[in-house]
Image (cartoon, grey):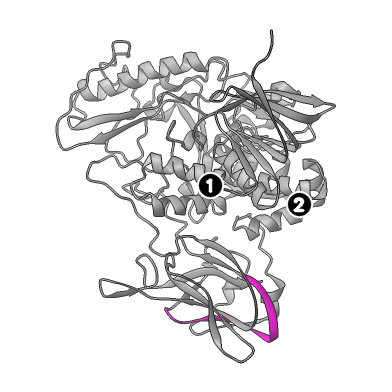
Amino acid sequence: MKNVLNTKTHDVDVCVIGGGISGMFTAISAARHGAKVVLMHDRPVLGGNASSEIRMWIVGAGTRVRDLQETGIMEELQLENMYRNPRRNFTTWDALLYEMVRFEENIELILNCTCCDAVSENGHIESIKGFQLTTYTWHEVHAKIFVDNSGDSILAPFTGAEYKVGREAKSEYNEEFGVEVADKRTMGMSVLLQCRETDHPISYTPPAWAYDFPDDDAMNNKPHNLYAVNTNFYWIELGGMQNSIDDTEEIRDELLKIAFGVWDHIKNHGDHGAENWDLEWVGFLPGKRESRRYVGDYVLTQHDVENCTPFSDVVAYGGWQIDNHLPGGFHMDATGGVHVQRSRLSEPYPIPYRCLYSRNIDNLMFAGRNISASHVAFGSTRVMGTVGVMGQAVGTAAAIAVKYGLSPREVGEQKIAEIQDALMEDDCFLPGLRRKISPLAQSATLTCDYGDCSALLNGLDRRIWGNDNGYFGKTNKAITYTFEQPVHVEGFRLVLDSDLNREFIEGNPNGVHTTSVMFYPMSYNNTTFGFPKCLIKHYKIEAQDENGNWNVVYETEDNHQRFIKQKLDITAKAVRFIPLSTYASETRITDYGSSVAHLFNFEVY
């Protein structure tokens, strides 16, 4: 039979499969470091589990451990969304995710395209092929490095890459949470609900095919307090006892019957205070937690997560609790929380680069929920805050590998310090390491009109381990670099305080983290969310010329980012940063509500 469908061929440096948070950050990071990138994604919107199709909010280390909010591209995204999307509208969110990828130089975005095949030989991938449903076109991508962030590790069966499915026996890694006998069971997938309180009664009639849950016992005592701010019905979960890839359609059908039955229970069975509540949205695309996990040169284990094993090749970190959903999901009784195993963490644990590339396919990398980790360790690494920082690490490493003509393994062996330096320069935190200060900043004399600003050059751009590592300044008080003679200044680097504790909810009696990137406003009278009040909004950079005159070389009155790296290309005897005043209600402020200018780095290069 004649094939009448078109085929489009792409030749790039890096091919990324999967446009969830990890895939997005991989593509963006690789592109920003000079690689030519294709991102192939099988959905019409980006974001994966965080998209409007599934609507899981992003959580990570900073949600559970103080001072550990993820930065880099993750913080860039979160701040942009908080600034432009005060009501946390999912249409605006989807558009922002699309914008970040679609309009990033060096990325070609292919949406609605499912990877269907790969050509590989002798442990090396030559190309992959995907079908785009909207155009009925085949896309064939040739690349030097392939990054599989599909979640389901789609390239594993196509290439022979080693992978695991399910739970390891306790004896394999001597893990406390391991099972006695290894099996293929996994964490399940969930259909999420969103409901909203209105100002009038609303009735509900369930579909005839929904399950009937007349009492809490029938619902297996799952928590369903509508006024708990973190309720997103994650426990409408199935699939752990089945094949989480092959049986997805069947699992989805069961989840929908449960989801609509749960809402019927809340509305029509017992007093749940739901008379004025309306069901606004049900996810018809289940959010998947676990399927195939690749095997790399190192497998992260429960011991590494809980003991914070140091790694010389650290490129990312985690801090979310070990959150191991047991395979029974909804069918397990939730009394006493027995449907999950949890281990709380108090420190960030390093994630080594060796977990992020294939052991037996020489140009295959990965950074999503499919990294090289045991089932138990995966219970922590799988969350989107963590896969986001791993995605940025993999994109950076892939670009550096392409630059030097190295494989993923070779670049880790030969250029790991360069990868780490690039990540920290891009505002990523790596436990145990400090960012290198630019030679120009080191050669200059640093002074400030108020207080002590020496911490700005300590290489730690956040509060951590009881130390502020920042500078508290005042409006119109300058921080100045003075040079012995006029020098060429390529640009400046700023890291401002954006309140990295804003997501921290442990011990908060209300559990409210109002600046969460996509926290759903459940009440009709809760129309907006917050923005970090401590962020500096208005500042200028001045340069002193050879005649001693100060000139403004950069100024913004509407800053809403933590990390700024701006080119100047000037010659100067001195350069200074000045936070400026904004007047609101006759109160002199430097930012979005605070009266203090707090920053972690001001540096010239």
Q: Residue furthest right?
A: 122
Residue that mark 1 sits on: 100
Q: CA distance from mark 1 to mark 2?
A: 27 Å
* Amino acid type, label 2: Ile
Q: Residue at x 36, y 45 (%)?
A: 88
Whole-percent x, y for residue 561 in the image: 48, 60
Horizontal side of 138 relative to 75 (left or right) equals right
Structural crowding at the residue carrying mark 1, measured as other residues with C-alpha within 10 Å and reported as few (<14), some (14–19) or many (≥20):
some
Q: Residue furthest left?
A: 200
User: Which residues are the magenta region?
Assistant: 475-491
* Amino acid type, label 1: Met
Q: Nearer the viewer, residue 350 or 217?
A: 350
Whole-percent x, y for residue 37 in the image: 67, 42
Residue 464, visible in the rendered structure: yes
Horizontal side of 459 relative to 227 (left or right) equals right
Residue that mark 2 sits on: 416
Q: Which quadrant of the structure image shows residue 502?
A: bottom left
- The quadrant of the rendering that contains the N terminus is top right
Dominant secondary structure of the magenta stretch?
Answer: strand
Q: Residue at x 77, y 36 (%)?
A: 363
Q: Residue at x 65, y 23 (%)?
A: 6
- The quadrant of the rendering that contains the C terminus is bottom right
